[in-house]
Amino acid sequence: MTRHIGHILMAATLILASASLSLGASITVSSSGNGVYTVQGSSMDGVSGIEMTLKYDTTSLASPSVTQGSLISGAMMAANTNVAGSIRIAVVSSASFSGSGTIATIAFGTHTGTGTVSLASSSLINSSGSAINDSSSTSTASDNNATSTTTTSDTTSAASVSGTTGTTSGATSATSGAATATSSGGATYLGTVTMPSDSQIKGETKTTATGETPVQPSTPEAAAKPGETPPAGEAPVAGEVPAATKAPAAAKKAETINVASNTAVLERFRAYRGDKTPAIMVALFKQQISPSFRQEPFVVLSDGTTTVTIVADLSAETGSSPNFALTGAKMVSLKKDDTSSTWLIKALPAKGALSASLMVLNETKVTEYPLTIAPAIKKAAATEKEFAAFLKDAAKTPAKHDLNGDGTYDGIDDYIYTANYLVRQQKAKTTAK
């Protein structure tokens, strides 16, 4: 079921800036007490994109809300809290962050005891799209102010956060790690981190600094009309600001953006508790994820070479041209159909990735579409009979059927096996033709 979550997204001015790779950047999670946790970034100079997953204890924490922090002010942030026990945060910016500060604040509406929050994974990239690998394990933060830290090295690899600006009906092609890309229309592309074009930030809202109050005349009559000056011999009303420099009557409120998330096939497997047969497992893959999005092929293996195309029908969307951001995959190309509102987004999932998603952003809404991908395994069933045997054996000896190395056999392993089975079936059909 699609759930809508309101978040504050602040549009940033497009700045084509090249930044050096941040060395020793780290993310920490700490508790402030009363169900409030702070995600802090340290030595973030040169970082332009962040993707992270946080896990929390559902027995003592519930109903999380995420607020954008000062370190990423001006960046575009989307948070997904749809899955109990998990919070996914993605941040993209055209300009690099600087120094240290708060990335986000997480407040839980329900909190009892010493609830714990841990940083399960994180990925950082610079403005040219080069990634910084996470190299350390993570610990846990609880209400006793323990801290969870992940430190990154200076090794570059495939980025986990990427995107492109969709403002053209032509195609945009990108090269992994490149600082620029070519476009037949007018879209701006900055490596694998992009933001709205100039035509899309006209509605940008600004607020006054903390504690400031916009200057207003004490009465309507006291306000001088633009261009007028007080009559000769009359002094301006005490405290009144000349019309030419007078501040706006009121600061605009930051725009609230709704986030719509679609249930991934992986989440179906995680939640499934019924009988297991090859037909049932395959049916979980065949159910439609969204009427507006389609993945071709409908399942792919994240082998580092196989690409996937997302067909997005955005005819129902209103407002400015959309922006696209990927987590867990790299943008390969972007093309809009000349005669419709259909977009074709070609992406390359990160090697070994279990999940990835496409985010479509406009002035009023962020829509997240999960890709259906899975890591490749060496032995997958070629026939339905072999598939049934796997499910039967897994029920008897679950420890031997842990495919993702998390120490347990569960729905995730069924998902991985089914994905590999379906890909093998697709290849067999193609070969037969």
Image (tube, rainbow, N blue to C red):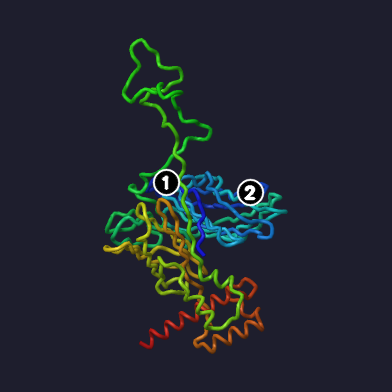
Please tell me the numbered disc located at residue 36: 2
Q: Image height check: is 281 above or below 55?
A: below
Please, what is the three-letter code of the amino acid marked with disc 2?
Answer: Val
> Relative to residue 314, is residue 418 depicted above or below?
below
In this view, the residue in front, 316 or 114, is: 316
Name the residue located 47 percent from the left edge and 53 percent from the top edge: 258
Identified at 46% across, 69% down, the residue is 289
The x, y position of residue 263, in whole percent, is 51, 66
Q: Residues within 10 Å of mark 2 (few under 14, many from 20)?
A: some
Mark 1 Cα shell of 10 Å, populated few (<14), some (14-19), many (≥20): some
Residue 60 circle label = none
Disc 2 from disc 1: Cα separation? 27 Å
How many callouts does the rendering have?
A: 2
Give 222 or 38, whichever is nearer the viewer: 222
Q: Position of residue 137 (x, y in %)?
A: 62, 61
Image coordinates for residue 278, horizontal then vertical, percent: 54, 83
Disc 1 secondary structure class: loop
Badge 2 element:
strand
- Residue 177: horizontal and vertical position, in percent? 41, 60
Question: Dot 1 corresponds to which residue?
Answer: 12
Going by the numbered disc 1, the residue's amino acid type is Ala
Name the side, left or right, on which 238 lies relative to 401: left
Q: Do the CB atoms of the residues marked 2 and 1 lie less than 8 Å apart?
A: no
Quadrant containing the C terminus in the rendered view = bottom left
Between discs 2 and 1, the one toward the N terminus: 1
Q: Image point 61% across, 79% down: which residue? A: 401
Q: Is residue 404 left or right of residue 314?
A: right
Residue depth check, mark 2 versus mark 1: number of the one nearer the observer: 2
Q: Residue at x 40, y 72 (%)?
A: 296
Q: Compare residues 266 and 95 and report the one nearer the observer.
A: 266
Q: Residue furthest top?
A: 233
Asked which quadrant contains residue 251, the reply is: top left
